[in-house]
Amino acid sequence: MFFRIVSVKEVETHSLETDIWIIVNRKVYDVTKFAPIHPGGAQIIYQHAGKDASVKYNNIYSSSLIATELYGSCISELDTSTVPPSWLTSAPRKPPLSDALSLKDFEKAFNSSAANDNLTRDANQTMLQRIWLRPAIIRDISTVPVYIAPVGAAKNICREDKLLLARAVYKAGNMQYIATTAFHSLAEILNTTPEQAWLQIRQATASGKIKRFLITADLPVMSKQEADERLKPEKGRGLVSNSSFINPTLNWQDILWLRRITGLLLLIKGIQQAEDTHLTLYYSLDGIVVSNHGGHTADTTPLSILTLLEIRRNCPEAFERIVVLVDEGFRRGSDIIKAVYLEASAVGLDRLFIYALTYGKPGVLHAIENR
């Protein structure tokens, strides 16, 4: 319960590094002690000292995070009648949802950078375009095996609530991987996604709703993404990255340890050669995700569709013994068919659904129907 309401003018007087108030979602927080230990660095907080940080915060974090983690630092509510007109911004206009005829149409207005020169990112798609189909007739094609691949920093792309994605995916009957860097708590997402969720993070599974662990192994260090670095609003980076959860020492002995502590299915994400597929069989994993992380980890890495072909030729037993998933570069139904023809168990579609999320739940459902 708040005992007083403060004006914008009063908040503005607390703008020193030794005395910092910020506004987030109409609540006033004293973050003087928190700023130096902020995981994203103190500088971003100092830039908003004595100001409204709601837009920047909501682009990155769940609204519930600050309310729970910094509950004791919330000192009052904001007197909204004192908010100056300069603080009020309007959302950019979007084309009508009906104009989005394919997944590519959702992507056009957004920055989608990758490592260095974006060569792998672009080649993921162009290689699929160079592969021609040999249609076989009179076959059952009523089911196209796709899933929603993990996308962590969703609010870097759109400001809408990422829980809408979970609701839409569940309604459409698709499977979703929950990313390590999801901005909502696992409990929040699971409450929205009662069944179809796999996990990309090591957490408790007491809910019984988590079916699989997905271990991302192709991002041992944060890569250099120059396109993001060139976006520098308010003297900060264009997109926020946090590599504190990445462990460069991850090795196969860690996989054995995970196998010992959980009975859930274990999958490795980031397979880029047949040799590592043989290792997943040796260490008795339950599946792999053929992926080059969209070219985000290292440029000029193998293209997912070609790696899938390599595994089919040099480790064919994998398709009989484990689940073989693939993602990156898939934009059309014809792309998915090409991977299924190479015996992929299912194809992952990722960032495009986050772009569709700017239209809310109808946008995600529209994207699924028009894939």
Image (cartoon, rainbow, N blue to C red):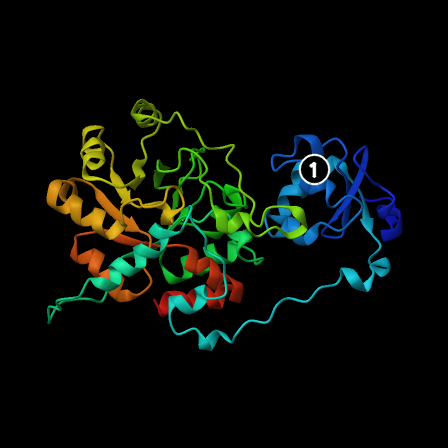
* Relative to 227, residue 352 above or below: below
Residue drawn at 31 percent across, 24 percent down? 260
Tell me if residue 332 can be seen.
Answer: yes
Kind of residue at disc 1: Leu
Q: In this view, does 75 lie to the left or right of 283?
A: right
Q: In which quarter of the image is the C terminus?
A: bottom left
Q: Where is residue 247 in the image (x, y as percent from the top left)?
A: 43, 29
* Relative to 72, residue 356 above or below: below
Q: Where is residue 264 in the image (x, y as percent from the top left)?
A: 32, 35
Q: What element carries label 1?
A: loop
Looking at the picture, tell me which residue is in the foreground, 26 or 118. Answer: 118
Q: Quadrant of the N terminus?
A: top right
Q: In this view, does 295 lie to the left or right of 312?
A: right
Residue drawn at 16 percent across, 54 percent down? 342
Looking at the picture, tell me which residue is in the foreground, 351 or 145. Answer: 351
Tell me if residue 7 can be seen.
Answer: no
Q: Where is residue 213 in the image (x, y as percent from the top left)?
A: 36, 38
Residue tagged 1:
70
Residue drawn at 43 percent across, 37 percent down? 201
Instruction: Rate crowding at label 1 as few (under 14), some (14 to 19) or many (20 or more) other CA atoms within 10 Å.
Output: few
